[in-house]
Image (cartoon, helix red, strand yellow):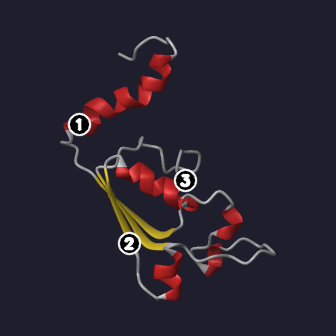
Amino acid sequence: LNTLRHELNNEVYVIAHSLGSRVAAAALLVHDTTQVSTTQAEQPQTEQPLVEPLVKGLVLEGAALAAGAMHENGEFPASRLSTESILVLYSSHDSTLRDNFPLGEAWPTMKRGAPRPP
């Protein structure tokens, strides 16, 4: 991605669907937050050089992510994703995500013998 974006001067967009959204978010998640910048105004004062985001945009379609996954304390905080922009597309009529995703999220708890969710 770095070669495509910075060395070849291309605009790179990552588009992911369903569980692929988790893969895309994990791949773009920056663990050292001093290495990400989105605008000059948001750059923290640091001695380390900041790296431009890897991609121009991240598009998640029917993302298999919890509602708060991109909040600051979520699994994939938006501020730590190496992208200039994020677009999340969903349908309130998506019965698969609405009905089955919560069960899948609860699975690790159920495997340990905890009570099943309602």
Question: Between tags 3 and 1, which lies in front?
Answer: 1
Three-letter amino acid code at the position of disc 3: Pro
Gap between marks 1 and 2 measured at Cα = 26 Å
For residue 72, side relative to residue 55 (left or right): right
Residue name at image x 36 percent, y 51 percent: 20
The outermost residue toward the right is: 47
Mark number, residue 13: 2
Element type where label 2 sits in the image: strand
Residue name at image x 23 percent, y 36 percent: 96
Residue name at image x 47 percent, y 55 percent: 25
Is tag 1's residue or tag 2's residue first in the polypeptide sequence? 2
- Residue 85's quadrant in the figure? bottom left
Taking depth in this image into account, of 113 and 92 the one nearest to the observer is: 113
For residue 22, side relative to residue 98 (left or right): right
Gap between marks 2 and 3 measured at Cα = 18 Å
The outermost residue toward the left is: 93
Mark number, residue 77: 3
